[in-house]
């Protein structure tokens, strides 16, 4: 595997404030985070800033991380479960440049884990914070494009439209064909988008000892799931929630319990399956 | 390893080097200076300042150079810099009737107080490629009349308003919001809408404004006035307590006069649409004025039926930094989500195949089995 260690982190860019954002902005974001933690699953609007990375690259997650990170923290950044994907490397480099922070690839050593599209396979523990990058925070968006409407639906807990869409999927496909960004009910109150993680990862959100923070930069929303909060994937009694399974195991570590990425390895279309979580995989070999 | 997209550290470093190299291009060609961009690509600088929400010709020129002329990228660079700047306060509203106008036209009256001033415009150029520009050479200086800085230019809209033919400019209560500090709240008040449109993508607003002319929310617009020139910016420092002039900036202002049949409470009169842009940007200011008027549909008791009249649709999609980011993020790896889709589509295909081969659906099989029990 390529070397994912960082250059000397003491080379902090002094042209910018610690962790890039000015202290006023950080305070504003922290207030939004506190509100989000107080009302699990509720989307708190916040004054998202233009970041030096493009919208869609994780500006929400980066702002959340920048607001909570300190010199004593250890940061891990993953994209698609891997520490060495280009965007994860880029974000880690960003924080190395603007904040004096130790980085790691080991899940259990990290105090803050910023992630795109995955939850680590290694179980999280007390005191860890998982920061999700969220493209579309509104779980009802594809059913109702208007923000003014969806806010009302949430306020009234009027979630019939979501249940109907899941039912329609069963009627059409014989099963709930939604595979990622699978909607969850948080603490029995708010329907929430878990961000585009595969539904495979949804059970890891339920009563997790770690704090989950979700940042959507372009849409300027923050929401949260406090530790040990029930998170239920929506389903029906006769069509219970199920996760993906593979008949193959990881070609590198032999795992049968992890989420597998599929790779096409030759022109004949031969396939190989490997763990998407590189840290988990490497340490099992 | 076999996974090309992983292992980013070195790849990213090389990619950055390549971008820098491409930016410079052929080393035997002289490098562009910021002054050249400012002076000779001035309209590009204007657009970047307008949509970047930052009036600084030097920074905008730098952004254009860094972005290799990609203006949306340059706008993004300028925005990302702007957001780190401290906020000292808010200027006094610009008084555009104090503008020293380089250009000022009205299409509603043959003559207006202060006169029609054609100024520098492409409107009457013939779009024939001028091959003399292909080679460097001395260009003549155009003769200009001395600017009359004392001349106040009354706005055409104000003259119409005094007659009662045009509605007064819609007033806004309280302090206007700031989209760069607070998230957009809907429904938005007009100051917030105008702020959004001023930062909005020129192409997007142009298409929306055009759509109103083609029947999707038509308001029968006339150009009451377009003016371009420099206006003073005043600021009241807390420690002084009175206004001082801190700068002069170039702006383009468009007052669009639109038909309005009247409503329950209001007799027939003309209504306003307003556009303002930094520098010389008439297309942008006009498109903005058309869309501003279209968005006032509800306020004027018109039925909103078209995209340009739909506040949520327009305001949520006007920003090209947001739009460009989200469209282009599709380049980032999505293989985890795609893998989930592969798993389910394969399963669905297997089911379909089984169904086609025996004519019985799995669901039907299950219910048959239940019935048999």
Image: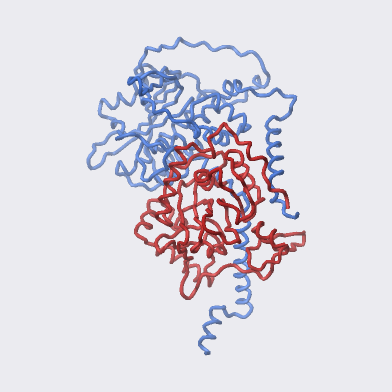
Write down the quadrant of residue B90 in the picture: top left
Q: How is the image coloured?
A: by chain
Q: Which residue sits furthest front?
A: A72
Tell me if I can see residue A74 in this picture: yes
Task: Give the x, y percent position of residue A105.
Answer: 64, 52
Q: Quick check: B36 left or right of B301?
A: right
Residue at the spot 36% in from the left edge and 45% down from the top edge? B187
Residue at the spot 38% in from the left edge and 53% down from the top edge? A151
Residue at the spot 34% in from the left edge and 59% down from the top edge? A156
A137, B224: nearer the viewer: A137
Question: Which chain is displayed in blue in the rendered image?
Answer: B
**Colour of the chain lettered A:** red
Q: Quick check: B231 left or right of A279?
A: left
B56, B141: nearer the viewer: B56
- Considering the image in quadrants, where does the N terminus of chain B appear? bottom right
Q: Quick check: B360 left or right of B179?
A: right
Tell me if I can see residue B314 in this picture: no
Task: Give the x, y percent position of residue B158.
Answer: 31, 25
Q: Which residue sits furthest left?
A: B265
Task: Give the x, y percent position of residue A279.
Answer: 66, 57
Q: Which residue sits furthest right?
A: A267
Task: Give the x, y percent position of residue B313.
Answer: 43, 46
């Amino acid at each position: 595997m390529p070397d994912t260690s960082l250059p000397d982190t003491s080379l902090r860019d002094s042209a910018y404030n610690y962790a890039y954002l000015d202290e006023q902005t950080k305070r504003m974001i922290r207030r939004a985070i506190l509100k989000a933690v107080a009302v699990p699953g509720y989307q708190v609007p916040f004054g998202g800033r233009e970041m030096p990375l493009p919208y869609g690259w994780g500006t929400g997650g980066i702002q959340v991380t920048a607001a909570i990170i300190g010199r004593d923290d250890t940061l891990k950044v993953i994209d698609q479960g891997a520490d060495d994907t280009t965007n994860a490397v880029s974000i880690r480099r960003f924080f190395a440049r603007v904040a004096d922070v130790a980085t790691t690839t080991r899940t259990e050593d990290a105090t803050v884990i910023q992630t795109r599209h995955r939850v680590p396979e290694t179980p999280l523990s007390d005191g860890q914070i998982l920061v999700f990058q969220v493209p579309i925070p509104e779980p009802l968006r594809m059913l109702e494009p208007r923000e003014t409407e969806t806010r009302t639906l949430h306020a009234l807990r009027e979630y019939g439209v979501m249940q109907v869409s899941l039912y329609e999927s069963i009627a059409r496909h014989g099963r709930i064909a939604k595979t990622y960004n699978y909607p969850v009910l948080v603490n029995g109150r708010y329907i929430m988008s878990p961000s585009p993680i595969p539904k495979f990862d949804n059970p890891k959100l339920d009563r997790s000892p770690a704090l989950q923070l979700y940042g959507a930069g372009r849409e300027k929303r923050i929401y949260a799931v406090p530790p040990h909060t029930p998170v239920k994937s929506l389903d029906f009694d006769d069509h219970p929630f199920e996760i993906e399974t593979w008949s193959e195991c990881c070609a590198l570590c032999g795992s049968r319990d992890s989420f597998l990425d599929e790779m096409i390895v030759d022109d004949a279309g031969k396939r190989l399956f490997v763990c998407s979580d590189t840290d988990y995989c490497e340490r099992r070999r | 390893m076999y996974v090309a997209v992983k292992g980013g550290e070195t790849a990213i470093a090389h990619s950055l080097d390549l971008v820098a190299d491409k930016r410079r291009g052929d080393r035997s060609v002289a490098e562009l200076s910021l002054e050249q961009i400012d002076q000779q690509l001035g309209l590009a600088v204007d657009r970047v300042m307008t949509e970047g929400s930052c009036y600084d010709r030097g920074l905008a020129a730098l952004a254009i150079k860094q972005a290799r002329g990609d203006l949306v990228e340059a706008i993004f660079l300028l925005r990302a810099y702007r957001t780190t700047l401290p906020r000292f306060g808010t200027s006094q509203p610009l008084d555009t009737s104090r503008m020293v106008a380089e250009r000022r036209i009205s299409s509603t009256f043959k003559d207006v107080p202060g006169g029609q001033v054609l100024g520098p415009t492409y409107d009457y150029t013939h779009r024939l490629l001028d091959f003399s520009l292909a080679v460097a050479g001395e260009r003549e200086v155009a003769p200009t009349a001395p600017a009359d800085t004392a001349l106040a230019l009354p706005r055409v809209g104000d003259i119409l308003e005094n007659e009662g033919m045009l509605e007064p400019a819609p007033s806004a209560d309280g302090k206007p919001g700031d989209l760069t500090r607070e998230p957009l709240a809907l429904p938005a008040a007009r100051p917030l809408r105008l702020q959004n449109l001023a930062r909005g993508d020129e192409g997007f607003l142009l298409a929306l404004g055009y759509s109103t002319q083609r029947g999707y929310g038509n308001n029968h617009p006339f150009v009451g006035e377009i003016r371009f020139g420099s206006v003073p910016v005043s600021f009241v420092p807390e420690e002084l307590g009175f206004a001082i002039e801190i700068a002069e900036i170039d702006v383009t202002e468009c007052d669009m006069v639109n038909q309005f049949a009247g409503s329950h409470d209001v007799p027939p009169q003309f209504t306003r649409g307003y556009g303002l842009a930094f520098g010389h940007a008439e297309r942008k200011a006009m498109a903005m004025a058309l869309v501003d008027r279209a968005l006032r549909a509800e306020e004027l008791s018109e039925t909103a039926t078209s995209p340009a009249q739909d506040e949520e649709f327009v305001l949520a999609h006007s920003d090209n930094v947001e739009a460009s980011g989200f469209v282009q993020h599709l380049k980032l790896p999505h293989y985890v989500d795609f893998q989930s889709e592969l798993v389910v589509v394969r399963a669905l295909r297997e089911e379909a195949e089984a169904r086609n081969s025996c004519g019985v659906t799995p669901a039907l099989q299950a219910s048959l089995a239940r019935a048999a029990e």
